Image (spheres, rainbow, N blue to C red):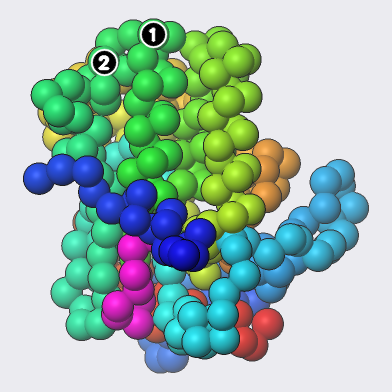
Amino acid sequence: MVPVRAWVRLLLKPLHPLGPQLAPAPGHGRLRSLAPLVRLQHLWSPGLTMASGSEGKLQRAPPYGWPMDKHEKNERDQKSVICIEGNIASGKTTCLEYFSKTTDIEVLTEPVSKWRNVRGHNPLGLMYQDASRWGITLQTYVQLTMLEQHTKPLILPVRMMERSIHSAKYIFVENLHRSGKMPDVDYVVLSEWFDWIVKNMDVSVDLIVYLRTSPETCYERLKKRCREEEKVIPLEYLEAIHQLYEEWLIKQTLFKVPSPVLVIEADQDTQTMTELYEKNRDQILTAGNMKHHL
């Protein structure tokens, strides 16, 4: 008899062809001045979550995913999953390109090509044209494809993902629902799926790197890169996404954060951002060790 875990993995195969503030680097020069642009947000064990309300008490969070056997757990503990989060045009691609040059890192970009072409259909483009009609269609597929990303076997010591299944639900599905473009029934059904996934699958994260960028900066970058589907995105949409990210990762008033969060102020130019990544490289890439020392 095939174990349930193996059966689900078969189904997921593709269907077709640390302190509140990071200390500046030793010595003097430009890197020292970059310190205020990076900070570690909510440094606690992934097994703890911030309680609701202003008291900020810590309480034990339920474990993610199904129970692993001893071999799987040891193997997972030796590897790290890092998610790069941020608004549209916040600089996630630049960040991933920088770290992709490092050996022993697997970089997974958002599967946008799949969202643009599902057997000849473009649910991403349809959603931007009519979110009320196509929002649930796109987000159902986004949830599936992000689950595929999370559940791929970890081969290298570090996996760096562009966004996550968590932000797909907590940011983009939430925005559709708040804006009245996703009916309650669609929202509840998608939430039920997400809750089951979190409870029964391993979609854990060891570190979130939040590229905190103003909506105005994102809007200017958006106009310069001229991607077809993004031409219809207004500033108001970016403001709504920014607010949700702030509520989730900074204020902790929206949903549970699955890991510690490293906040990088990302309104900077490419050169400054590259220097910030270089300065905090070790801190980011040793995220897997963090869970053993908290």
Q: Residue at x 30, y 78 (%)?
A: 155
Q: Residues within 10 Å of mark 1 (few under 14, many from 20)?
A: some
Per the image, the residue denoted by label 2 is: 126
Q: Amino acid at mark 2?
A: Leu
Q: CA distance from mark 1 to mark 2?
A: 8 Å
Per the image, the residue denoted by label 1 is: 133
Q: Residue at x 52, y 69 (%)?
A: 206
Q: Position of residue 178 (x, y in %)?
A: 59, 19
Residue lying at the far bottom of the rendered structure = 27
Q: Is residue 182 visible?
A: yes
Q: Is residue 23 visible?
A: no
Residue lying at the far front of the rendered structure = 1
Q: Residue at x 44, y 91 (%)?
A: 26
Give the quarter of the figure containing the C terminus: bottom right
Q: Position of residue 71 (x, y in %)?
A: 50, 87
Going by the image, does 149 lie left or right of 191?
left
Q: Residues within 10 Å of mark 2 (few under 14, many from 20)?
A: some
Helix, strand or loop status at disc 2: helix
Frontmost residue, 146 versus 67: 67
Quadrant of residue 194 within the rendered picture: top right
Residue range in magenta is 150-159
Frontmost residue, 32 versus 103: 103
Q: Residue at x 63, y 53 (%)?
A: 199
